[in-house]
């Protein structure tokens, strides 16, 4: 009786090829799984650094508020070495991105243009700048500055909204308070950079 099909040697060769294909597929699947786990861990670590930098920005806001409270009588003109500007500088790029052929970017590494704090315990570098929301330097002027009237001692001085000051009593009883914009930059590990802004009324 005649036997059909492939010789046994040929059949063994097909099994070997199929085994190698399955082995390669399993290897690739294992490598993909390992890469996915590594990527997830890296993303989780980066998010933790980002959150840490954002939390450290609070120290910059508090430092800026403290500086404003101590320099009430010196806010009519720029004090660049302290990171203070008496105008809003609306065209300034606060992220520090350099635009070709223009000088509209803020140099955060220049200690004569921004205020810098000491590194915090988690190795974050905090810097800040303060901008008074005015178009010109000099005394506060409601026509050139973003101001708000207040109600003090029960007497209306303009607006009926009661606004809180940072240090009650440290500012005079003039009707207008001006807005200030605080921009904080935090540079942390793994080249992580965060920006936080706060607008206050003083």
Image (tube, helix red, strand yellow):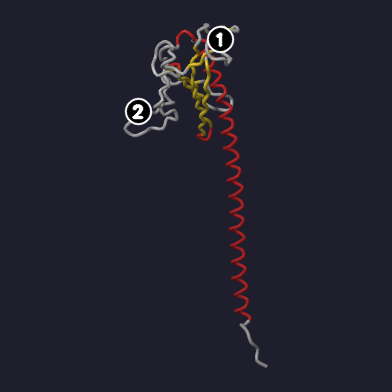
Is residue 163 in sight in this rendering? no
Spot occupied by residue 85 in the image (x, y as percentages of width and height): 43, 18
Label 1 crowd bin: few (<14), some (14–19), many (20+), radius 10 Å: some
Which picture quadrant has residue 1?
Answer: bottom right
Q: Is residue 48 above or below residue 78?
A: below
Residue at image position (52%, 22%) is 199
Spot occupied by residue 31 in the image (x, y as percentages of width and height): 59, 54
Residue 68 tag number: none
Which picture quadrant has residue 84?
Answer: top left
**Residue denoted by label 2:** 103
Label 2 crowd bin: few (<14), some (14–19), many (20+), radius 10 Å: few
Q: Nearer the viewer, mark 2 or mark 1?
A: 1
Q: Secondary structure at mark 2?
A: loop
| Front one among 37 and 58 | 58
**Residue denoted by label 1:** 156
Q: Which callout, 2 or 1, points at the residue further toward the start of the chain? A: 2
Q: Secondary structure at mark 1?
A: strand
Spot occupied by residue 55 in the image (x, y as percentages of width and height): 59, 27
Of all residues, the one furthest to the bottom in this rendering is 1
Contact? badges 2 and 1 (CB < 8 Å): no
Residue at image position (41%, 13%) is 77
Residue at image position (57%, 11%) is 151
| Front one among 115 and 158 | 158
In the image, 102: left or right of 160?
Answer: left
Which picture quadrant has residue 131?
Answer: top left
């Amino acid at each position: 009786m005649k036997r059909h099909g492939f010789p046994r040697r040929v059949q063994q060769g097909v099994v070997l090829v199929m085994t190698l294909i399955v082995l390669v597929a399993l290897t690739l699947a294992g490598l993909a799984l390992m890469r996915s786990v590594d990527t997830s861990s890296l993303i989780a670590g980066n998010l933790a650094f980002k959150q840490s930098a954002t939390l450290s920005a609070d120290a910059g806001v508090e430092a800026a508020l403290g500086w404003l409270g101590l320099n009430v009588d010196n806010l009519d003109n720029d004090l660049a070495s302290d990171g203070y500007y008496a105008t809003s500088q609306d065209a300034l790029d606060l992220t520090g991105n350099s635009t070709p052929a223009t000088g509209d970017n803020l140099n955060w590494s220049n200690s004569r243009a921004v205020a810098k704090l000491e590194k915090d315990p988690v190795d974050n570098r905090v810097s800040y700048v303060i901008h008074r929301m005015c178009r010109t330097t000099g005394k506060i002027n409601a026509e050139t500055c973003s101001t708000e009237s207040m109600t003090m001692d029960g007497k209306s001085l303009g607006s009926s909204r009661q606004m809180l000051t940072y240090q009650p009593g440290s500012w005079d009883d003039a009707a207008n308070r001006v807005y200030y914009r605080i921009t904080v930059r935090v540079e942390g590990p793994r080249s992580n950079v965060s920006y936080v802004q706060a607008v206050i009324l003083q």
